[in-house]
Image (tube, grey):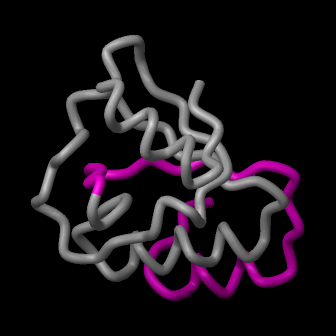
Amino acid sequence: MQMTGARVLSELEPLRLDYAFNGTLGYSLEYGFGYQSVHAFMLTRQLKKRAAKLVIVMDSSKVESVRAMYNFAAKEVDILISDDNLKQEAAKSLTRQHVMVL
């Protein structure tokens, strides 16, 4: 079954998750994790509400990508999974905001 739009958000309402995994278009030290659509941004917010831990999966090339219009604060993320090329400055910034960087 495939769902799109507002239906996705309503289908998440009754769920309680241990971990929720989501991607991002980019990460800015100043603004956090970025999304181009309000739908993707709202999905991330809903996942945060429903999950004990929100995990963002992002490759290191997305650091300081500023093409997003909707931003999700780094302090709202519990875990970031990235590759070995993640900039040290970004890793330190996330760690200071209590994000576990893997």
Magenta span includes 42: no
Image side of residue 42 versus residue 54, left or right: left
Q: Residue at x 87, y 52 (%)?
A: 18
Check residue 13 for magenta coloring. yes
Front-lying residue, 72 or 10:
72
Q: Position of residue 2 (x, y in %)?
A: 54, 62
Which percent across, then down, holds residue 53?
A: 76, 54
Residue 90, above or below 45: above
> Total marks drawn?
0
Q: Quadrant of residue 54?
A: bottom right
Work out whether 94 lies above or below 59: below
Give the side of residue 5 with respect to residue 45, left or right: left
Q: Position of residue 94 (x, y in %)?
A: 49, 45
Image position of 59 with respect to 7: above or below: above
Residue 37 falls in which quadrant of the image? Answer: bottom left
Seen from the viewer's position, the closer of residues 50 and 76 is 76
Q: Which residues are magenta?
A: 1-29
Quarter of the image for the N terminus: give it: bottom right
* Residue drawn 63% across the image and 77% down it: 46
Q: In the visual, does 62 lie left or right of 7?
A: left
Q: Is residue 45 left or right of residue 52?
A: left
